[in-house]
Image (tube, grey):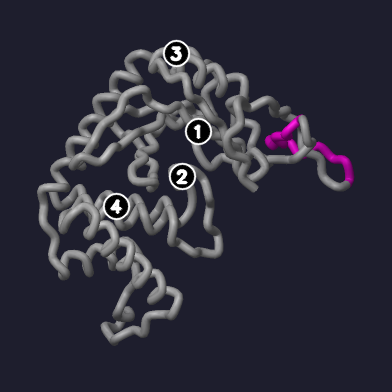
Amino acid sequence: MIKQKTTSIDWEIEVKPVFTEGAILLRGYQTIIRSDKNIALSVMKDTYHPRTNAEFMQIVNELSNISKSTDVNFSEYDSGRKVLAYLKSPKSSSIGGHKVSDQILIGNSFDGSSSLFVATVINYAGSNFTYMNKNAAFRVSHRSKDLEQCFDYIEMLQDYEQEKEMLFKRFGEMEKLAITEELIEKFIKAVVDYKTEDEEGNEKEISTRTKNKINDLKNAITKKTNELGNNVWALFNGATHYTTYEYKGSKKRNVEGNMYGTQNTMNQRALNFCLNLI
């Protein structure tokens, strides 16, 4: 279940001991409870130090003030096991005359799936994807206890902005690179990640489900090349348009930025393929 576009995260977690059915204390483990609904979010080892929603909100407020973002939205996913905050950037950019906007994404989890992190959500032509800023590393571990010693807000945001601007520059470089039908086929194969041969080198039949993915992605690429030209930027736009609007997987996650699941995985494959062409 996804809860979108709220103004805050107004609930907290509690950490409780774990007992067996015979009421015997299970040492070395703890249960993380969503206190307002009494939902068990996870059972973790006692070395896991969950970052609370109060800490999460503190980071969101600090980054909102420093970045001068006045538009902040929150969402929670999987009953609150993951929480996300989106800070819309007051700056705007354009690539090939098309507006590109971005949001600072702050995320946290209570199930061990991620640290508390910061990433970028890029929005353009209605499509969106999440970019994990590697050089502007921001990771607050669930093992350390002291939040204040984990990072410097101003330095982190400066690194974040520099890396984002470099990414936008590379998007501009993508626009200058022409594509061929052969390149499109290689791109589709990389993004969908399917094989045409088995381990022994024999021809392998492609499933109907995979064929549908291939056709839908190909149609999305055609749509974007018609709009943006026969270039790598349009190729990448085709993939993010597909994951945002056309993807029909059994576990489709309608999270802004396609942060989780197959949609995220396909976007990352598309980005890496296109960046490697520059």
What segment is highlighted magenta in the picture? 22-35
Drawn side of residue 84 relative to residue 268, left or right:
right
Please state which of residues 13 and 221 is positioned toward the viewer in this rendering.
Answer: 221
At which x and y percent is residue 185? 22, 69
Drawn side of residue 110 relative to residue 194, left or right:
right
Which residue is the site of mark 1? 107
Which residue is the site of mark 4? 237
Principal SS element in the magenta part? strand
Which residue is the site of mark 2? 259
Which residue is the site of mark 3? 65
| Secondary structure type for disc 1 | strand
* Mark 2 closeness class: few <14, some 14–19, many ≥20 residues within 10 Å: many
Give yes or no for residue 33 being in the magenta stretch. yes
Answer with the quarter of the image where residue 57 lies: top right
Q: Distance between the residues labelled 1 and 4?
A: 25 Å
Tell which circle, 2 or 3, labels the residue nearer the N-terminal end. 3
Comparing marks 1 and 4, which lies closer to the viewer?
Answer: 4
Comparing marks 3 and 1, which lies closer to the viewer?
Answer: 3
